[in-house]
Image (spheres, rainbow, N blue to C red):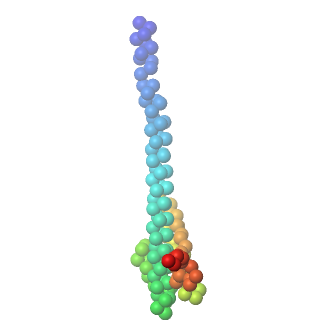
């Protein structure tokens, strides 16, 4: 008779142990999801910065408005041009993207890029035969 009472006392023990573990797993999944979305946003804004810098450098080499060209391309990629400066034929810029995360909080992700013509001495040295 004592065994039957002990078996009934242990029922539900697994539920008590699994519930906190399930909460930890759900919390970890939410955190990984948030970090993943921030990583994707950072990659996206860096790509927008790189492409905008290339467009600005291309416009500068044709004597066009480099910063206007960079701003147009950054907007087409979903980012905003924050700063832009032209030094000779080299363009330096910063773009930003506002990301809305969980619970409506927003985070601004920024990236910087520069582009211009290759310098004369830089590059690969090709050995002569």
Q: Which of these two is toward me, 13 or 119?
A: 119
Query: Seen from this angle, which residue lies furthest bottom?
Result: 63
Q: Position of residue 63 (x, y in %)?
A: 49, 93
Q: Nearer the viewer, residue 101 or 117?
A: 117
* Vertical position of residue 119 compared to residue 14: above or below: below
Residue located 43% across and 79% down the image: 73
Report the label total: 0
Residue 37 relative to residue 82: left or right? left
View extreme (front): residue: 129
Location of the N terminus (image quadrant): top left
Residue 53 visible in the snapshot: yes
Q: Is residue 93 visible?
A: no
Question: Who's the residue at 45% across and 25% down the image?
Answer: 13
Q: Residue 129's x, y, as percent?
A: 50, 77
For the view shown, which residue lies furthest in the top direction? 1
In percent of the image, x 42 and y 22: which residue is there?
A: 11
- Which residue is at the front of the view, 129 or 123? 129
Residue 56's place in the image compared with 78, above or below, is: below
Query: Where residue 14 sits in the image (x, y, percent)?
Result: 43, 27
Residue name at image x 44 percent, y 20 percent: 10
Residue 36 position in % (x across, y down): 46, 56
């Amino acid at each position: 008779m004592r065994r039957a009472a002990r078996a009934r006392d242990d029922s539900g023990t697994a539920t008590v142990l699994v519930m906190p573990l399930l909460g930890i797993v759900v919390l970890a999944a939410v955190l990984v999801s948030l970090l993943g979305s921030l990583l994707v946003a950072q990659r996206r804004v860096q790509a927008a910065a790189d492409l905008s810098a290339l467009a600005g450098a291309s416009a500068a080499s044709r004597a066009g408005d480099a910063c206007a060209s960079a701003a147009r391309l950054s907007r087409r990629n979903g980012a905003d041009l924050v700063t832009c400066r032209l030094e000779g034929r080299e363009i330096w810029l910063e773009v930003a993207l506002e990301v809305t995360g969980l619970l409506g909080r927003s985070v601004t992700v920024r990236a910087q890029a520069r582009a211009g013509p290759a310098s004369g001495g830089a590059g690969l040295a090709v050995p002569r035969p």
